[in-house]
Image (cartoon, rainbow, N blue to C red):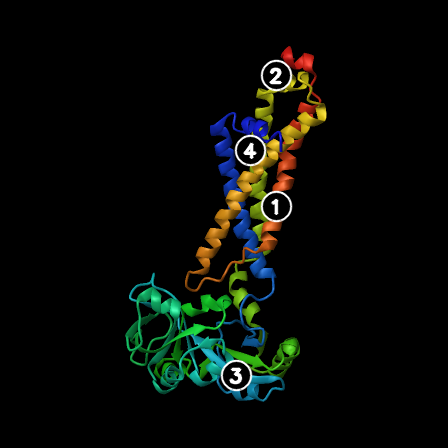
Amino acid sequence: MKYFQLIWSSLFRKKTRTFLTALSLTMAFLLFGLLQAVNVLFSGPPQFSGADRLVVQSRVSFTESLPLAMRNQLRTMPGVSAVTWRQWFGGFYQEPRNFFAQFATDPETFREVYPEFVMPDTQWQAFEGTRTGVIVGTQLAERFGWKIGDKIPLQSTIWPQLDGNKTWIFDIVGIYDVKNEADRARTGVMFINFAYFDEARQFARGEAGVYDVRIADPNQAAGVAQAIDAMFANTPDETKTQSERDFQLGFFKQIGDIGLIVTLILIAVFFTILILTGNTMAQAVRERIPELAVLKTLGFSNATVTVLVLAEAFLLCLIGALAGMGLAQVVSLGLAQQPNFPAVPLDWKVWVQAAVAMALLALAVGLPPALRAGRLKIVDALAGR
């Protein structure tokens, strides 16, 4: 550390150039942190409750409905402890930008399958007993300033009522919360009493979008899923059963291989940063060739000069990496507070990956000019050759 002041002074010899380079590195590591966090979200273990739940959808597509008659068959399956069903409503409040997730579901069985949702018993009873009743999560209630007793008009983009009207009026009878902070994003959803919705909609009555199946032993999830699909094989309503996590991430994966997309973006970003930072370091060393010759004249060895230049590259990359990852952490925490947005886990694994990326980048941009500085001959440098 005795040479730190020398390294710092050399790095900030041209302040504007160093600032712009550090800013570029900051943006690169901001992207790195957020995109790697997305990779963790898609490839890591579940970050929310639901390891004991399966989702049963149509084998053709999740947009295809399944008959309500299937619920009795699912309830009798070995290993199944509870079954509920839901249908995507697809509406908005007042104007299209006020969009949020809404599902029509059966209040009684929904409570059995989703025990992580907490609400007073009186509100659960009101949800079951009020045909136009809906429950909303705490985030959603805070977003629009809703309270129990409010009447909420929703404009459906999918489901007209029997008279053709697409404006549905619902009564808020409960506001639910979650037991675990990992489930916080789920409090941005509205649940509608399915009985009223099914009776009042114009088409597809007696059908549900998907079934949510709670199983007794999460370790038997694969076996139960296979048994469910085998039961409905070669029928008009063939099914595809998967874990709740895989079902939710399937929506995002429709756009393609997320991991490959993230990797290609990061390669492009860091290739650009490699060229930019490498050119900056090479230019900085060229400008200081006489100064480096003076250092050697004063007794600095070739190895010491090499390490000083390499340390300068590491310091530049470290500043950019810390600033970028710090911003990524702030953005990640901010996104986690947004309704209907999955928590993006910027955990220690992402920080370790960033540290490795920073070290490799520093070596790539710092080693060539450092080796050149180490091999520098004093006479040639002072003579300007």
Give the label, 2 or 4, closer to the camera: 2
Q: Quadrant of the C terminus?
A: top right
Q: Is residue 207 above or below residue 263?
A: below
Q: How many marks?
A: 4
Q: Which residue corresponds to the image point at 60% horizontal and 62% vertical from the top-left?
A: 44
Q: Quadrant of the N terminus?
A: top right
Distance of mark 2 from mark 4, alpha carbons? 24 Å
Contact between marks 3 and 1 (CB within 8 A): the answer is no
Disc 2 marks a residue whose amino acid type is Pro
Query: Element under label 3?
Result: strand
Residue in front for this viewpoint, 194 or 182? 182
Residue designated by label 1: 355
Tell me residue 145's x, y (percent): 30, 67
First reached walking from the N terminus: tag 2 or tag 4: 4
Residue designated by label 4: 276
Distance of mark 2 from mark 1, alpha carbons? 33 Å
Q: Which mark is residue 83?
A: 3
Q: Is residue 129 above or below residue 22?
A: below
Tell me residue 34's x, y (percent): 52, 52
Contact between marks 4 and 1 (CB within 8 A): the answer is no
